[in-house]
Amino acid sequence: MALRRIAVLALSAATCALVPALAAPTAGAVTPSEQVRQAPIPLAKGGDQLKVTVTESGSAGLDGTHVLKCHPTGGDHPKAEQACRTLDKVTRWGKDPFAPVDPGTACTMQYGGPAVAHVTGRWAGRPVDATFKRDNGCEIGRWDKLVPLLPAAGA
């Protein structure tokens, strides 16, 4: 009887040691929870609408206010279909495509011009109220990620 207990305990210990090793992901592997976080957000049909106001772009054709509707595409934005596709690509679970640059981020000292954009509305079921400028490398990158929702520099 004692021998049987020892055998059961040894087998249990071996199983407990083996299971985590089998379940552990290999280096560079994406776990199922990471796949969910990286997957695009399924966007609600009919609820995505943004108002984009651009000032000081240096081009009278780019300054002004436009409305962008997606799912289905509409509004008076001059590049509505491309803007909706771009927003769909950058929208991810847990990531706000309109989020400001994190405070304390080291940014290159570049100046991309005086253009300012203000975006308000709803995207992916969430309220949006974001301001974009081109006054350092981080802000330029943040702006450029949303072109053609925002006008391309020098356009």
Image: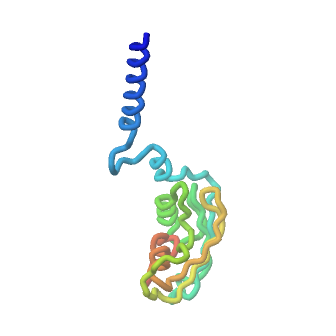
Q: Which residue is drawn at the image coordinates 64% and 56% (left, top)? A: 125
Is residue 92 positioned above or below 4 on the image? below
Who is closer to the viewer here, 89 or 20? 20
Q: Which residue is drawn at the image coordinates 51% and 56% (left, top)? A: 92
Who is closer to the viewer here, 30 or 56? 30
Residue 131 coordinates in the image, percent (x, y): 60, 77
Who is closer to the viewer here, 9 or 20? 9
Residue 63 coordinates in the image, percent (x, y): 57, 83
Query: In which quadrant of the rendered image does the N terminus lie?
Result: top left
Is there any visible trace of residue 155 in the rendered image? no
Q: Residue furthest left?
A: 27
Q: Residue furthest front?
A: 2
Give left or right: position of 21 versus 49: left
Count the labels in the image: 0
Is there any visible trace of residue 1 in the rendered image? yes
Is residue 92 positioned above or below 140 on the image? above
Query: In which quadrant of the rendered image does the C terminus lie?
Result: bottom left
Q: Which residue is drawn at the image coordinates 60% and 81% (left, top)? A: 64
Residue 38 coordinates in the image, percent (x, y): 46, 53
Give left or right: position of 84 versus 53: left
Who is closer to the viewer here, 76 or 26? 26
Q: Which residue is drawn at the image coordinates 33% and 49% (left, top)? A: 27
Q: Residue furthest top?
A: 1
Query: Colour scheme in the image?
Result: rainbow
